Image: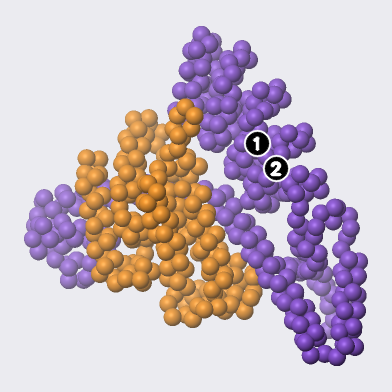
Amino acid sequence: MQAAVRMDEAELIRAAQQGDQRAFEQLVRLFDQSVLRLATNLLRSPEEANDIYQEAFLRVHKNLHTFRFDCSFHTWLYRIVSNLCLDALRKRKVRREESSVVETSEGLLDRMDTVQEQRADSDPERRLESQQLKERIQEVLGGLTPRERAVFEMRHYQGMRLRTIGEVMGTSEEAAKNCLFRATQKMRAALGDFV
Amino acid sequence: MTCEETRKNLPLFLYGELSFDEEEQVEAHMDECDACRTALAREKAMFAALDGAEMAPAPEALEDSRMQLRRRLAHSEHSIRRSNWWDKVREGFTIHFHFAPGIAQVAGAAAMLVLGFLTARMTPNSLLGNFHSAGMVDPTTSRVRYVEPLAPGKVQIVIDETHQRVLSGSLDDQSIQRLLLTAAKDPSDAGLRVESVDLLKDNSQSAEIRKALVYALEHDSNAGVRLKALDGLKQFAEDPETRQALTSVLLKDDNPGVRTQVIDLLVKRHTEAMVGVLQELMEKEDNGYIRMRCQKVLQEMNASVETY
């Protein structure tokens, strides 16, 4: 089954390389959900996540003819996506760490309200606790370096192996492991009171 | 393995990223150490908390991104085709002028005239209006609608073709505005609606455009489109018809971002009619900011925050 899936993917890539737009669209659909999820989680902004999505797939479309099957398409695509996300995070660090909460004329509004939460709790007390925990997690994620954040997101939420993350980030498995280690250490230090 | 080494390895242990030997050592240590078992339980709790903090993009966000990408790709394909076509024509002409004898130059010029005449004949004038067109009818996408067997060995295939044309003109041009108004209601493409409404909103002095913005605000399924429409209507918050639409949106819209902006607009002026609306809103609103705004305005107007 796995081989059949891989064969389909390779066929789609070859067809898209020949200019078959439908094949390209199918190829996009194989991966775009996880790309948007990664970008949304990393940037915590639906608008910026969409920008990354557009830019990543336009680059894939433009450069697909250079793809030589030296690595998996997933790795190649994620290399593009993670570079774009890292650039966006670095630019943001220069500007200032951007919060998902924006000030309206007389109050605060969380732009991530338009994003679905994985879990919701109907008990108000637990909802408050979970809200505080969520805020603390956002805070600590904001405190990670762009690389730590990217490695953590890919390992924790996307379930990617450290070896693949290393390939995507253009570094060794060991370096990715150290990055993940530092990220989890910071998480533990910040979330210690909550768990 | 010591307690310190074990605890350092806990995240990698949970991620399954330790080597076989390291994993064995962690497990062996756990069997004998209560404190490290507790540390592992805490690490698992932290992982669970992090799992719960994942943000999944809303399903419509993925659909919007896909449509936007499809449109951008179609646009870039079109540009490439167009430039290829012109490159070939230009290239042909360059050769004629440099190397061909006089008679060939005349023939080339005549060919261009005929080509221009045919292109003009192929372009439906009704669509051109009085703005400039890049002027090409070029099939860009096609789809087999159905196939029908005819005589043995023969088949009839019906194909739907989509033609793309590039038009440009001023935003004040009525023909351009008509196209934008149509695009602002295209049910299949939220990205297109967002961009069209965004362009239209700067001309909201026109009654027709304002009507379209009110319609988008009240009926569009995409919150991004509704927010753009709202942006265009802000300067008309005092207009009774717009105010009525804003009130209806405040009570019905499911997006807290839209409701937040609407309430900010509506409460700038306190009217008696607002009291009932805000009281009704207080009964069902669950967004803290909006409730706070409601409450404050009702108190300022000496009205109860509840209905009886």
Quadrant where the C terminus of chain A sits is: top left
- Tell me which residue sits at (24%, 45%) in the image: A190
* Chain A tint in image: orange
* Chain B tint in image: purple
Label of residue B200 in the image: 2
Q: Nearer the viewer, residue A61 or A113?
A: A61
The image position of residue B14, as x and y in percent, is 25, 59
Read off the chain for label 2: B
Q: In this view, does B190 lie to the left or right of B174?
A: left
Q: Is residue B179 left or right of residue A48?
A: right
Read off the chain for label 1: B
Q: Can residue A119 be seen in this view?
A: no
The image position of residue A148, as x and y in percent, is 31, 58
Q: Reading the chain from its start, which is encountered first: label 1 or label 2? A: 2
Q: What residue type is labelled 1?
A: Gly
**Mark 1, residue position:** B232
Is B215 drawn above or below residue B9 in the view shown?
Answer: above
> Tag 1, which secondary structure?
helix
Label of residue B169 in the image: none
The image position of residue B49, as x and y in percent, is 31, 46
**Residue B113: quadrant of the picture:** bottom right
Q: Which amino acid does label 2 sit on?
A: Leu
In three-dimensional space, the C-alpha distance between marks 1 and 2, rounded to whole angstroms, equals 8 Å
